[in-house]
Image (cartoon, rainbow, N blue to C red):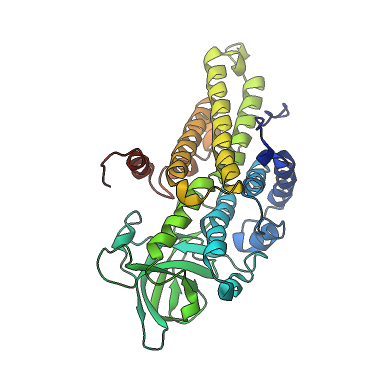
Amino acid sequence: MTGPAMPAPAMAGAAMTGVPEVVEKFRAAGSELAKDGESDLAVAWPRIARLGIFEPGRSSEAVAAIEGLGLGGLPAGWVYAVASQLFGILTPLRRLLGDHQRHLLDGVESGEVLLCHASTEEGGGSDPLGITTRADRRADGRYLLNGRKSFITAAPLAGQALVFARTLPGRSPFALSAFLVPLAGAGVTRSAPLAKSALREVPMGVLDFTDVELSPDRLVAAEGAGLSVLATTTAWERALLLSYALGTMRRLLDRTVDWARTREQFGRRLGASQLAAARIADMALRVHRSRELVYGLAARLDAGVPMRSLTAEAAMVKVSVTEDHAALTQSAAGLAGVRAYLEDSELFADPATALAGLTYAGPNDLLRLTVARELGLPVGN
């Protein structure tokens, strides 16, 4: 397929200055990495990091870099892992850790250390006050960590985990604390990667902690601040994680347009059908809307708007973009037919990964309740 790619929708405003150049730079880098045929994320991770993607900078440029990697054809699971680490863990930690704790992030920017976010347990992930993992403080100020975290993205590869544990009984908002836990130490056991159908390029696993000793400097923020830390990390994740899907969505749109221009059936090209053309136009609208939402939120963060005031907006962005991604994928699959389900096809739509977006970083139905509460409705979970 050799037709011209759909142009990226223009975005106005000073905050967007330089974004097309960043997208193109990382598209080219992502394309080169994808051509290598490397399938092991542990091997690829330092190479991705050497592109400078984990260095501090503007949120809009980070979104552009991640979009570029996806547009260049880097595996969706890898791009997701990059966005998850950068926005869901690293960026919040840079704001939450004290000066005496900065060394805990050594090796992250270079890709020597991969981080994972460990809050979910077998009993559920959307009710943090249901967490059973415990961190008991001893007389010497150290903590003893015990418990299990389940369905943790990158757990089989990560060097450190941001772990949320109970430091008080009950459902008090101050019952949880957050710790940055090294995973190579005594008492930590990792499962084999879980078999999954979505985002398969990034492994998921289980972490078991048995009498893991943690020094006081491993505590993030303060004891009892775990719920606040979790709210911060999830808000950042919901706001900008879907940058990982932007390049994938654009790439799928471009290939579907090429297909419709050249595919002959019933004596005419597929793109000559008003129904097919309208579906592709809807795909373009979904790409445009998704980019505007994610970049718009990034621009507000770059302008200094505090994340705590954007919680509901972050939830709306996450819901909107994931549902647009799923709908776009459904449209592409309907136009490509069986080729949409063949992994070695240029029209592979990866529907399982698109549908998974409706669940990760908070199920969309629960996030709708977050929005409803922001509107003043007296609704519980």
Farthest-out residue, bottom: 140
Could you tell me which residue is drawn at 62 percent across and 46 percent down?
63
Q: Is residue 346 visible?
A: no
- Which residue sits at x=40%, y=80%? 143
Residue 146, position as x, y percentages in the image = 36, 76
Q: Is residue 216 above or below residue 252?
A: below
**Where, by quadrant of the figure, is residue 249 drawn?**
top right
Residue at x 57% of width, y 76% of height? 100
Q: How many numbered dots are placed on residues in this image?
A: 0
Residue found at the very far top of the displayed protein: 267
Q: Position of residue 105 (x, y in %)?
A: 59, 69
Residue 353 drawn above or below residue 111: above
User: Is the residue 323 above or below the residue 188 in the image?
Assistant: above
Rendered image quadrant of residue 225: bottom left
**Residue 211 in picture, x, y percent from top left:** 38, 81
Asked if residue 96 is positioned above or below residue 21 in the image, the reply reads below
* Location of residue 264 by image quarter: top right
| Whole-percent x, y for residue 336 in the image | 55, 28
- Nearer-the-camera pick, 220 or 44: 220
Picture quarter with the N terminus: top right
Near-viewer residue (176 or 146):
176
Q: In the drawing, does residue 148 fall left or right of residue 103? A: left
Residue 232 shows in this picture = yes
